[in-house]
Image (spheres, coloured by chain):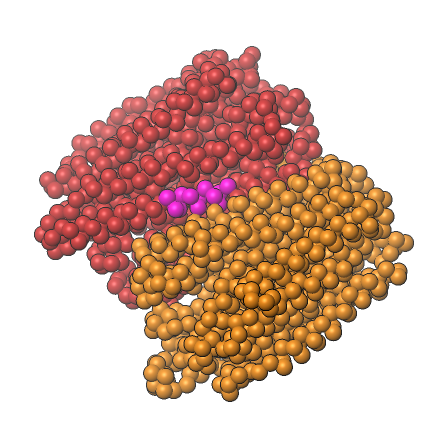
Chain colours: A red, B orange
Amino acid sequence: MNFMFIPLIFGFLGAPIIIWLFWWITKESTGTPRMKELAGYIQDGAYTFLRREFKTISYFIIPLAMLLFVLLGWQIAFGFVVGVLFSMLAILLGMSGAVRANVRVANAARTSAGKSLILAFRGGAIMGFSIVSLILIGISSLYLIFRVGPTNPEAVHLLVGFGFGASLSALFAQVGGGIYTKAADIGADLIGKIALHMPEDDPRNPAVIADLVGDNVGDCAGRGSDLFESSADNLVCTMIIGLAFVDIYGWNAVLFPLLIRSVGKITTIIGVFSVRKWGKRSPLTSLNIGLFSAGIFNLVLFYVLSIWFMKDIRLFYCLSSGLLSVFVVSLIVQYYTGIKGIPVKRIAESSQAGESINILAGFSYGLESAVLPMVLIAAIILFSYRMLGGGLLGIFGIAMATLGMTEMKGMIQSIDTFGPISDNAAGIAQMAGISKEARESLDILDAAGNVTKAITKGYGLTKCVLSSVVILFAYIFLLAEYQGITLTSISDIAINLNLAKPVIISALLIGATVPFLFSALIIRATSKAASKMVEEVRRQFYEIPGLFEGKANPDYSACIDISTKYSLKQMVLPILIGLIAPIIIGFTLGVWPLAAFLIGVKIVGALLAVFMFNSGGAWDNAKKLIEQGHYGGKGSSAHSAAVIGDTVGDALKDVAGPSLHILIKLENILSITLLPLFLTYTII
Amino acid sequence: MNFMFIPLIFGFLGAPIIIWLFWWITKESTGTPRMKELAGYIQDGAYTFLRREFKTISYFIIPLAMLLFVLLGWQIAFGFVVGVLFSMLAILLGMSGAVRANVRVANAARTSAGKSLILAFRGGAIMGFSIVSLILIGISSLYLIFRVGPTNPEAVHLLVGFGFGASLSALFAQVGGGIYTKAADIGADLIGKIALHMPEDDPRNPAVIADLVGDNVGDCAGRGSDLFESSADNLVCTMIIGLAFVDIYGWNAVLFPLLIRSVGKITTIIGVFSVRKWGKRSPLTSLNIGLFSAGIFNLVLFYVLSIWFMKDIRLFYCLSSGLLSVFVVSLIVQYYTGIKGIPVKRIAESSQAGESINILAGFSYGLESAVLPMVLIAAIILFSYRMLGGGLLGIFGIAMATLGMTEMKGMIQSIDTFGPISDNAAGIAQMAGISKEARESLDILDAAGNVTKAITKGYGLTKCVLSSVVILFAYIFLLAEYQGITLTSISDIAINLNLAKPVIISALLIGATVPFLFSALIIRATSKAASKMVEEVRRQFYEIPGLFEGKANPDYSACIDISTKYSLKQMVLPILIGLIAPIIIGFTLGVWPLAAFLIGVKIVGALLAVFMFNSGGAWDNAKKLIEQGHYGGKGSSAHSAAVIGDTVGDALKDVAGPSLHILIKLENILSITLLPLFLTYTII
């Protein structure tokens, strides 16, 4: 039992670091009165949305918790509630950091590029540390409360409630926040950029504040919750899988994931604080130093722990393969979406032939971009599986690869939140009229953002697919145990998961349709909300005299209201569909076909998500490339075509894609949670 | 042996019918001299393309046939060549009917709507009868040549060469023809409609003749080859599956598919000739009478043959479920793409908010439209499987459902080719200046086309998924036989196709990426060819004085050249990728993972294809709805937005989507053909 103090200590170690980061950031100046005013608007909007979103979520969470209590016992219900609350707390803390850092980054940009970059990065690190710490505290507390241990091994299963809570909370945060931000963004672009040819973040545009709020509630809080859920699910499921190998590694098989996460926090600290001024080196280099030092320290950690704690050097190779795959996938993503890659050039070039050809080009490269990462991930799966000799133990190898990859999450989350913070800073600078003096710093932030986005996307994608495979095996292991099948090899369940069985093929087919339906609903929700925003912005330009000339102020709050209202309203249907689908399959086709259904969801969901992320990213950068003066530059017909591609991509890459990532894992962890019910009440 | 004269007789029965149809059509007048001239251009262009395409194909076919001869024996090579030649002959005959019917339909439209509809339909029936007849002749001749029979049952496997030949020929025809037609169509639209605001088929537009040629080589020949291949593959694979049930049904299990196809020709004849003037009923009604009489006679036939030939009434239910599913799926497709459905209305409405929202709306409904058909198909699979008691025999039930569905193919192909013929007629009417007098008839043809398109799409989709499941089981059955596994139940191969095996999951994942890569390449090829066309059309308007004013003639042949050249050049890469992918998997991961790979290809390919078909169809009709005067009507900003959606959809629905349908089956039949090689030379 003593061991559990390690994760708890490392968990609570987050508190002083987070407090210090808050202190370090808030001691900086917030700049001119106008900047303070703007930052105030953004903060208000963001907190208002989060408050109302939490309220909406509670309508679902409270009855669901009661239902879980009645049907599955207090532990699952309690874990579920803790998962929801900790996830909310993490994103609340992270977003609080972001809305404080943004204006200070803008102000620092007036004097020092390096300072502004480090401020933006440390602002993001608040989210990173909040997530890492709260997961450790949450899981290890539940471990102690449920009295898990070698004498009570089955109790590990009870931890899934935490994962389910984190997943559900994440889906709400991502779908709601995503619709919010893209309604504002698309609405602002369609009227501002396309119809009125105004620049980005023009203060005359009524939707511009809503757009900046959106960066915080969508890109920052949404993504944070995504990472919280996938790390939590991953940890719980790796522990469940570890349970099957207690005869080989002892109880350490269950503890190893917790241990590696705890000690791994040191590498996050090293990584985060390596991002500082390194003499006269460029600010971008310091970001890379941070990333690579975290990576290298992780490898050392993997080596030591594999040998010392698990006494199996092969685990080191599995862990490392997962870690390295992140970097390789990031390179692929950078090729497809980077402003210097061939695809972006081609898309920008094809914009000269009009909107349709731009759309088709982005569509085509987006589809293609899914191929290499998936093949690589398939290779990692096979490598780590065979590294442990194939068979049942091979599954533990796959779990280890996922664990290795997840170790970078503190750093990754920091640079992920870095993105919306610098976007916000650029917006504030533009609106406060200081963008000229801050030009150089803002350009550096933007360049850094382009690289970090590729890395976080590569990470998100690898994590999504690999983690979902681990969650799937957790489901299969649990199911075998419930049905009294002693697993000595994977073949013991071959008859149940025989791909030649029509019911398995059908379930796979039905599962494959779910991401289509889900993203259809999300895209429609986003474009509905965006249409409302377009109407409102158009109305203000018609009805407020002098607005276009800059003589009158727009009504920012009306736009914020629309984003808030429609995102909370429109998020409900897709989420309900996502929740209900696996329940129907579990009760009708049965528990084994449900595994096939989940595989269908995963494969198609992951492919669609990569397509959406990368086509969106490439459209975005193709527009930027044209804005840099190529293929006719700003105001050319190629530019208008590229803006159309960019707005289409916005809904895909920032709402539907990230929501799919969450859905994939949510449906699986939900199935694990409800497994005892499906076994009791199968209908057909 | 005597029995085989039945399919041969029914096969050759096609000849007099086709000759009669040619006679009946060509005796009609071709109208004004201008109409004759235009029809001549179209015929020349179409035949030139087909000639050059056949030449390009021969570069692949001849070495491939020699390779097959050396590696797999003369029978496979011979069947392959026959498959290629018969497929080419069928589309040559069918297209010859179409390019003769088009101008006569236009001329008849000046006087009688009914007459023009029947002419267009019977023009299409030439394609229908050519396909039905040549498949019967081809397969039954090979059956006799290879001396297949109860004493030599294994020889049934040799028929796969025919299927492979038909599939490869189809992929070339569809990809090449599809790129041809859409390069011309998109090129004509982008400059003509969007930049210069000219109407559809305006004779001043240099790409307009290439567009009309494209209707014939893409929509007519391409689709015809698709149906030829899927019917051929389906017939061969159903016979291979039947082989496993000789102990239950005797040799009749193998013969039944051939018999039902032979006698089924009668229902095609009844159906086709039921489409005539029925008193004062509207022409549309006569089309429906044809469809329903074919459907009902098929049901009668199923009943009689199930009881008399197979002595198992349950087969009747399986056969019927397949047939009925076509109608249900068609209704779903009609809802999503029909001009009266809610989705099309919403897409048209959202065009008012600009191009991006139009694209997102079409995208969203397209994704959603894949859900219900897939769930229905999954239900049909489970129904027909359980109808025969599940287990191994259940697979025969699924094969029967597919067989039942395929029985409608003669009728379906006739109404499918009806589409391009009426499009051509409308084009000729517009260009020859007779469209005013023919207005009423052309509207009726157009309305009929809207219904027939939904039916053929629903058919294509159902057929694609169900057939591919049957081909998959043919692969599995053959593989089990080669490996000496006696199949007494599906569980005998459970260990080989265990979905929990990482290698199976990886193969599934890799297979799932193939449709993404393939359609990425096809879309890019199409947009490249379209860009070239845009350049050429733009050049002509700049360089030919008086062209826009209608005082000078455009250079139609330059555009025809571009379409021909670029389509033949661009089709090679995607086809090679499609061919190589399963070969790599077969030699590296092995033959059982290859089955999982094929399932990945099928599921994702089918979903992507439905999405592409339906979003494209919906964008098309949204544009038409606006052109009818809604949401601002022609020339409004909503209309321009809708035209963008339509051109994006063109590349998806008429090139990438149909090519995916073929790819899915090609990769599977290729794997069946090469199976002996994979078993001999697996690398890993």
Q: What x and y, as percent, mark residue B418?
A: 57, 67
Front one among A408 and B299: B299
Q: Which residue is drawn at 38% across and 79% down?
A: B539
Q: What x and y, as percent, mark residue A235?
A: 47, 27
Give the left or right position of residue A335, taking residue B680 as reference.
left
The magenta segment is A514-525
Give the left or right position of residue A109, taking residue B627 as reference.
left
Quadrant of image for the C terminus of chain A: top right
Q: Which residue is drawn at 26% across and 25% down?
A: A19
Front one among B75 and A72: A72
Residue placed furthest toward the right: B151
Q: What x and y, as percent, mark residue A610?
A: 46, 47
Q: What x and y, as percent, mark residue A386?
A: 62, 37
Give the left or right position of residue B181, taking residue B579 as reference.
left
Q: In this view, does B280 lie above or below B427?
A: above
Q: Which residue is drawn at 48% across and 73% down?
A: B426
Q: How many labels does the image show?
A: 0
Q: Does the magenta stretch include residue A102?
A: no
Front one among B312 and A557: B312
Is residue B84 in sight in this rendering?
A: no
Q: Kindly indicate the quadrant of the structure image that contains residue A622.
A: bottom left
Q: Residue at x 63, y 81 (%)?
A: B27
Most frequent secondary structure within the magenta stretch: helix
Residue placed furthest toward the front: B279
Q: Is residue A516 magenta?
A: yes
Q: Kindly indicate the quadrant of the structure image that contains residue A275.
A: top left
Is residue B553 in sight in this rendering?
A: yes
Q: In this view, does A336 lie above or below B380?
A: below
Q: Kindly indicate the quadrant of the structure image that contains residue B507.
A: top right
Q: Is residue A171 above or below residue B146?
A: above
